[in-house]
Image (cartoon, helix red, strand yellow):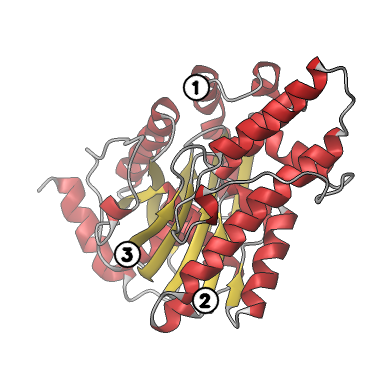
């Protein structure tokens, strides 16, 4: 065992006796450079996010190389600002945590390398955190009383998962997308409708002006009894309807199209999530949480809450500040891992396709 590893283990025994444990967390999995300081996994002392949206907007989506370079340029100042806002020095922290997957490998490596350097320099315990586990943990920031077990829908640009959160370090996948994630489908439809990046929020804004019942998009797969999703066919149906109208010289109401598409996706996500929750035994069948970037979509939040309430299920959803990628959620997920003594070695690598189930009991 290295000197650093020995020192980390010694510090761990001290931390378990401390009333206030403060973790510096870093998130660079995609196009946000973020840092936060979180106390005891539930209290946010600072939460700084630098978005790269202006950089990627001309290209209509995230360009991995541009994302990585921007992270390199901004990570130092973002981390320092997080420390300043928390009114803490590096020496006053108790651990350093960082997202190590899934995500863009180049972007992940920037945050991972920076976090390792800080942990080594300050002699602090180091923890790698799964990105989806972080999104789930975002609910703990808004609901300090929430504890596993519960069921959670994680919906983002890269993921659409229904997960049984059996414990803080144990996850079971119930259902997942077979093709496009919900956020990915939103972005692709938004692009066809002529909306700028980021597509999802702009499509939601346009949908507010439209009639959600104007068009119906049939999806036999999603009407089945299973818990998996499929959004590629729905996306294609929207694209074909728009193109056919254009070729026939017909004018289509794009707001109606956006609203109808959004309603279709939202109804599928909400229906399957509530049904999957009801099928779970014990407390997991009584509590449903929402997480991920698409959880910022108001239509989805409202539909999930309404369906859960009708089924007698308690519903949880993070505050908007913790829906999209941020570092506070990383700090929340890292706290439980730290208290369980699940420290990581400085040889930890970035894993762009890391599965949530692969991290169970090893988070």
Q: CA distance from mark 1 to mark 3?
A: 30 Å
Q: Which residue is mark 3?
A: 169
Please name which of the two marks, 1 or 2, marks the residue nearer to the observer. 2
Picture quarter containing residue 354?
top left
Viewer-nearest residue: 95 or 301: 301
Which secondary structure, mark 2?
strand
Viewer-nearest residue: 28 or 291: 291
Which secondary structure, mark 1?
helix
Q: Which residue is mark 1?
A: 64
The C terminus lies in which quarter of the figure?
Answer: bottom left
Query: Left of 213 or right of it: where is 72?
Result: left
**Residue drawn at x 46%, y 78% as measured from the top left:** 285
Which secondary structure, mark 3?
loop
Residue 164 point in image, percent of width and height: 40, 66
Q: For residue 287, which numbered disc appears in the image? A: 2
* Residue 51 makes an appearance in the image: no
Decide: few, some or many residues near mark 2? Use Cα within 10 Å; few <14, some 14-19, many ≥20. many
Q: Earlier in the sequence, mark 1 or mark 2?
A: 1
Q: State the residue lying farthest toward the left.
A: 1
Viewer-nearest residue: 300 or 142: 300
**Residue drawn at x 35%, y 52% as measured from the top left:** 356
Q: Earlier in the sequence, mark 1 or mark 3?
A: 1
Residue 67 point in image, percent of width and height: 53, 24
Viewer-nearest residue: 213 or 312: 213
Q: Are marks 1 and 3 in contact (CB under 8 Å)?
A: no
Q: Is residue 210 above or below residue 62?
A: below
Residue 105 point in image, percent of width and height: 38, 29
**Residue drawn at x 40%, y 35% as measured from the top left:** 114
Decide: few, some or many residues near mark 1? Use Cα within 10 Å; few <14, some 14-19, many ≥20. some
Q: Earlier in the sequence, mark 3 or mark 2?
A: 3
Q: CA distance from mark 3 to mark 2?
A: 18 Å
């Amino acid at each position: 065992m290295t000197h650093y590893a020995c020192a980390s283990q010694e510090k761990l025994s001290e931390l378990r006796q401390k009333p206030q444990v403060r973790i510096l967390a870093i998130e660079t999995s995609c196009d946000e450079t973020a840092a936060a300081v979180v106390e005891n996994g539930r209290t946010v002392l600072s939460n700084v996010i630098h978005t790269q949206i202006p950089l990627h907007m001309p290209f209509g989506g995230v360009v991995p190389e541009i994302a990585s370079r921007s992270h390199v340029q901004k990570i130092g100042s973002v981390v320092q600002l997080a420390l300043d806002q928390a009114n803490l020095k590096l020496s006053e922290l108790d651990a350093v945590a960082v997202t190590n997957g899934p995500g863009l490998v180049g972007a992940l490596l920037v945050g991972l390398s920076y976090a390792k350097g800080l942990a080594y320099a300050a002699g602090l315990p180091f923890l790698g955190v799964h990105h989806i586990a972080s999104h789930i943990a975002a609910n703990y920031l808004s609901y300090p009383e929430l504890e596993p077990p519960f069921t959670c829908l994680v919906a983002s640009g890269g993921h659409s998962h229904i997960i049984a959160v059996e414990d803080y370090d144990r996850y079971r996948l119930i259902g997942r997308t077979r093709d496009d994630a919900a956020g990915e489908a939103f972005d692709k439809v938004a692009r066809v409708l002529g909306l700028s990046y980021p597509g999802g929020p702009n499509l939601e804004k346009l949908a507010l002006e439209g009639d959600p019942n104007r068009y119906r998009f049939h999806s036999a797969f999603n009407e089945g009894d299973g818990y998996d999703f499929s959004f590629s066919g729905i996306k294609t149906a929207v694209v074909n309807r728009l193109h056919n109208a254009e070729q026939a010289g017909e004018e289509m109401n794009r707001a109606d199209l956006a609203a109808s598409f959004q309603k279709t996706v939202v109804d599928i996500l909400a229906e399957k999530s509530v049904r999957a929750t009801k099928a779970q035994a014990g407390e997991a069948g009584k509590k449903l949480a929402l997480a991920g970037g698409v959880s910022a979509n108001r239509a989805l939040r409202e539909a999930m809450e309404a369906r859960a309430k009708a089924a007698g299920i308690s519903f949880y959803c993070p505050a908007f500040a913790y829906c999209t990628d941020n570092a506070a959620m990383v700090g929340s997920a890292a706290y439980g891992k730290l208290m369980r003594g699940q420290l990581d070695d400085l040889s930890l690598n970035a894993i762009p396709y890391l599965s949530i189930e692969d991290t169970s009991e090893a988070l």
